[in-house]
Image (cartoon, grey):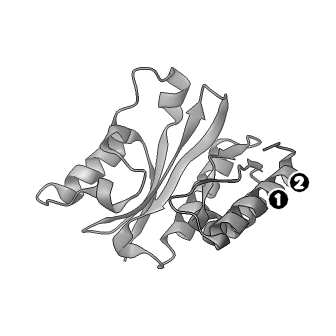
Amino acid sequence: MYSVKVLTAEELRDLYQKTYCHSKVNLEKKIEYFHCDDFHPSFFSDKKHEDTLRFTVVYNEKDILGICKFAWWECPGNYSISYLSTNKDYLKQGISKILIEETFRYFSNTYPNETLNFSGYSIEGWKYLRNSILEASVKHRVPISEKAIEYITEWTDEKRKLFDESREIIKNTYGYAY
């Protein structure tokens, strides 16, 4: 059994403390891209960023299973997902798809007619999540703007092919030049 909520940074911090207060779990090692600095917006962030910073979180009584971070970013001047990542102990259980669905539902209701931008995909994100993102965009009527694959830790022939294909698809869809 799990819960899904969209939280502020302060609410995420409270959930983190409640969940892990007597534990030696280091969530930064379990959820890629998550950092405890997420609990405190940067001194350099503007008010709109602080007011819109949200975390879609899937959790149960003992763990945070996945997080999607999004907000308004002054530079480049849009709403954007910073990361969507599943706890390594809960991979291949549909957590990312739950995060996508709830993030798009929330975004559609809170920011109608706004575009949701994405940072570049990882190989895994492109392979396993992109179709769910495209489907959620249509279902919730949220326009999106994507980038191609940007995050690669090791090159293989398959990853090179996906990298190149992603650039071609994004160029044809959005007109971005790579």
Residue 60: quarter of image:
bottom left
**Foreground pick, 27 / 16:** 27
How dense is the environment of label 2, judged by Cα within 10 Å: few (below 14), some, or many (20 and up)? few
The residue lying at 20 percent from left, 60 percent from top is 25
Quadrant position of residue 87: bottom left
The quadrant in which the C terminus is found is top right
Label 1 Cα neighbours within 10 Å, binned few <14 / some 14-19 / many ≥20? some
Relative side of 102 to 55, left or right: right
Q: Position of residue 53 (x, y in %)?
A: 49, 38
Q: Is residue 139 visible?
A: no
Q: Nearer the viewer, residue 172 or 44?
A: 172
Task: Tell me which corner region of the image, top left, top right, bottom left or bottom right, holds residue 44.
Answer: top left
Question: Quick one: which residue is furthest to the left in this view?
Answer: 22
Q: In the figure, 44 relative to 104: above or below?
A: above
- Give residue 178's mark: none
Spatial CA span between label 2 and label 1: 5 Å
Instruction: Locate residue 155, reporting x and y percent.
Output: 58, 64
Any mark on residue 169, and which?
1
Tell me which residue sits at (77%, 54%) in the image: 167
Tell whether 59 sits left or right of 128. Answer: left
Q: Kindly identify the amino acid type of the residue bearing the numbered disc 2.
A: Asn
Of helix, strand and loop, which one carries label 2? helix
Identity, as a three-letter code, of the amino acid under mark 1? Ile
Q: Identify residue for label 2.
A: 172
- Label 1 SS: helix
Does the residue at mark 2 contact the one at mark 1 (Cβ under 8 Å)? yes
Q: What x and y, as percent, mark residue 108?
A: 68, 50
Question: Is 123 located above or below residue 151 in the figure?
Answer: below
Residue at 29% over, 66% down = 63
* Residue found 19% across the figure and 58% down from its top: 20
